[in-house]
Image: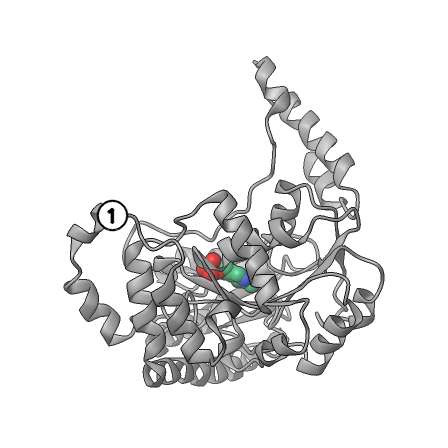
Amino acid sequence: MCNELLCNSLFCYNSVAVHMYKCAWQDEENIMSWEENVRKVVPYTPGEQPKVKNIIKLNTNENPSPPAPAVVEALKNMDSDSFKKYPDPTCDVLVEAIADFYKVDKENVFVGVGSDDVLAMAFMTFFNSDKPVLFPDITYSFYDVWAELFRIPYKQIPLLDDFSVRIEDYFGENGGVVLANPNAPTGAQLPIDAVEEVIKRNPDVVVIVDEAYADFGGQSVLPLIDKYDNLLVVQTFSKSRSMAGMRIGYAFGCKKLIKYLLDVKFAYNSYTMNMPSLELGSLAIKDRAYFEKTVSMIVNTRERVKKELRELGFEFADSKTNFVFAKHKEKSGKEIFDYLRANNIIVRRWDAPRIKDHLRISIGTDEEMDILIAKLKEFLG
Ligand code: PMP
């Protein structure tokens, strides 16, 4: 009952909140009076991080390469005595390194504890209207969680059957737009001019373009921040820079937009970024050659894996990311998922309408992908 209500919760935040509230009461035996005023929310479920070794982990789109050599070296020599002090609240060393790399001013850059933190902060800052924020029905499953948490009305717009975005769906009145591009978990890329059209058609609201995976062959709308003051572009160190564990995300926008984000950040938590993240992140971004080399390794492996998956009877939207979102022509997603799991290979699957037979397979090392393909061959005959 509860899930059904949540799944059908298009555009009706208030009634969903009431239902969640009732469900929480119904589930509990001993209800405390203070619970009435608790902010209840259905949390995001992160991918599994297994504690055991000998697992091929292809479930959270991490990068199999180590971080840049300068990061590894600096970590060895890090002076823990510096941890006595608070870190720099304005994160200058990291902001300046990012601004340098992307050739923008430092006032165009915002950093946070992974792009999750940047996105959450952006939802809190820019989505403050009675009109619904628009995003696809199949996309990063944190967007609706933040909307629920911050009491932001939202509308999830169905992707077309081939998982593409129909941009006209985003032209109506709204309180903001969020597009992951390339999208996750589908991997599909919306052409850059189509994204620009969405930004152009929505001058009265902020359009967030989540580019967590754009480095793997997608195109970035970063050059458009000078043209559109309502555009926020969000990226991360977690995928293309092999630093998911350090939690570093960043965003670009016009100076006014970034200033509003900073005001909310400083109203919430002055010291979001810890000292190692600031120092190691700034070293990582300086090594362009290593970044390009490790990204192209993923792209080459991905293209090879796509071919092999197709030969095994999988279908998928063309991926420009470090994962493939694939469905088998005959076998169910659950059967394949369970078989792989039993053989120590973890991929990601959502038991959700439209995608329950899809598996999101992260691109690991060539050796890991060889084992995956061999196991799939074994299972599929
Ligand atoms: N956006 C998308 C589309 C993602 O898939 C992820 C990874 N789960 C994130 C943002 C957040 O990544 P991180 O917080 O590690 O930067």
Q: How is the image coloured?
A: one colour
Percent x, y for residue 135? Answer: 71, 59
Would residue 38 be found to the left or right of residue 290 on screen? right
Name the residue rendered at 42%, 47% in the picture: 270
Q: Which image quadrant is residue 174 in?
A: bottom right
Percent x, y for residue 149? Answer: 62, 41
In the image, the residue with mark 1 has its CB under 8 Å from the nearest atom of ligand 1: no
Foreground pick, 58 / 177? 177
Quadrant holding the N terminus? top right
Would residue 157 be found to the left or right of residue 41 on screen? right
Q: Disc 1 marks which amino acid?
A: Lys
Name the residue rendered at 20%, 63% in the picture: 75
Foreground pick, 158 / 151? 151
Q: Is residue 219 above or below residue 169?
A: below
Residue density around tag 1, few if under 14, some if 14–19, many if 20 or more, within 10 Å? few
Per the image, label 1 sits on a secondary structure element best described as loop
Would residue 188 be found to the left or right of residue 62 on screen? right
Foreground pick, 351 / 323? 323
Regarding residue 212, the answer to whether it shows in the image is no
**Residue farthest along the right direction in this orientation:** 172
Foreground pick, 255 / 125? 255
Mark 1 — residue? 85
Percent x, y for residue 209? Answer: 62, 67
Regarding residue 193, the answer to whether it shows in the image is yes
Percent x, y for residue 61? Answer: 45, 65
Name the residue rendered at 63%, 42% in the picture: 150
Q: Which image quadrant is residue 255 in?
A: bottom right
* Number of callouts: 1
